[in-house]
Image (tube, helix red, strand yellow):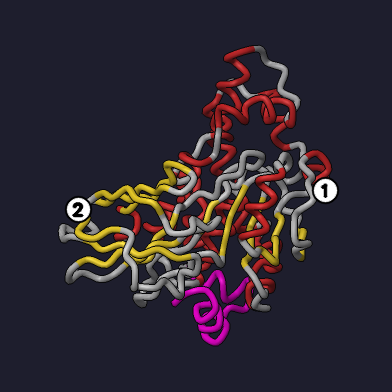
Amino acid sequence: MDTITHVEVTRVAAERYQISWDECFTTEPVIIFAGADPLAIERANPCIEGAHQQATFAAPDAPTRCYFLLVPATDEPLIVAERPVEMHGGVNFRDVGGYRTEDGRRVRWGRLFRSGHMSKLTAADKQTFAALNISTVCDFRIDEERAHENTELPGAPAVHTLDIMPGIGDAHFFHRLFASADGPSEVVDAVHQMLETLVREAAPCYAGLFEALLEDPSGALLMNCSAGKERTGVGTALVLSALGVPRETIGYDFMLSGTFFPAAAEVPRVLEKYAVTRPGETGRALIWPLLDTRLSYLEAAFAAIDADFGSSAEFLRQNYGLDAHAVKRLRDLYTN
């Protein structure tokens, strides 16, 4: 597994961070530097020197988004950041940067983001969003969802509405399922089928995502749907595949929704969205597989890709024209 998955960055106060790691990153003492630009972190004034597996410190100037350069004595340096972006009125908002590709590059921090709905962004959230310099949003929701989960995004980013169905066949798939299902196991099976459908029947909808990426937006790009888990999860998996990130790492990123998607808090919204009338714990248990994050969901999508195309590379080539030239352009734009 990528060493970056063994490093955790947490903001413990407005201007204080804690960074921890295990021996899979390094057993050596580490010097930590900080900066607002991940490509230009100065090494003149370290935040801390000689740290072993954990460090808590104040970051200079504490910008909205802070990046850290970890320099072990002899091991490879690593740039890290907080994975989540704190949004009190949004869900599952996080940076997709830092992951190592098969050719030794890393996905650029602050260039690609993913999220769930942002329908209740606070004034502070909007300041945070503006500071991310997001110039392009690929919104996978359908019109009905946008009507109920709408918000005005700061900076007037270009929004590409790609209209991917939240179910199978039509927008009321889960309404019917929750009305008729005998129990949660049927919902688990349905989510597996939905992920297969996303790469079989909905594959053309993701073409706009790759068109936006190849246009090289002036700022960062955000992939977005209601929960930021399945449709956004597949979109992110396809982008990371194109950038050369191994599937094991893509699975790690997918499973982070289990940490950053507030499943319990989203129960009322999902019950209302799908008009679930079963009472109390019965209704909650029935919808839980849709709120849950399971690696088997992503594996179902990859299994469909492999069955139909043999590999992610061939899937991307046939569906989106990502030949060697286009893949090189993507990797030059979004990795370093």
Is residue 133 in view? yes
**Pick the front one: 48 or 70:** 48
Badge 1 local density, few (<14 within 10 Å), some, or many (20+)?
Answer: some
Give the residue at mark 1. 143
Badge 2 local density, few (<14 within 10 Å), some, or many (20+)?
Answer: some
Q: With respect to residue 320, does 273 lie above or below?
A: above
Q: Is residue 333 magenta?
A: yes
Callout 2 amino acid = His
Q: With respect to residue 335, does 89 lie above or below?
A: above
Rendered residue at 30%/53% (across/down): 6
Left or right, 224 with reference to 156 = left
Quadrant in which the C terminus appears: bottom left
**Pick the front one: 276 or 86:** 86
Camera-near label (2 vs 1) is 2
Give the residue at mark 2. 52
Rendered residue at 55%/32% (across/down): 263
Q: How many marks?
A: 2
Q: Which residues are magenta?
A: 312-336
Q: Residue furthest bottom?
A: 325
Instruction: Residue 214: give x, y in percent of width and height.
Output: 64, 77
Callout 1 amino acid = Asp
Rendered residue at 73%/46% (across/down): 169
Determine the secondary structure under disc 1.
helix
Quadrant in which the N terminus appears: bottom left
> CA separation, marks 2 and 1?
50 Å
Q: Is residue 103 magenta?
A: no
Left or right, 159 with reference to 28 = right
Rendered residue at 32%/53% (across/down): 7
Determine the secondary structure under disc 2.
loop
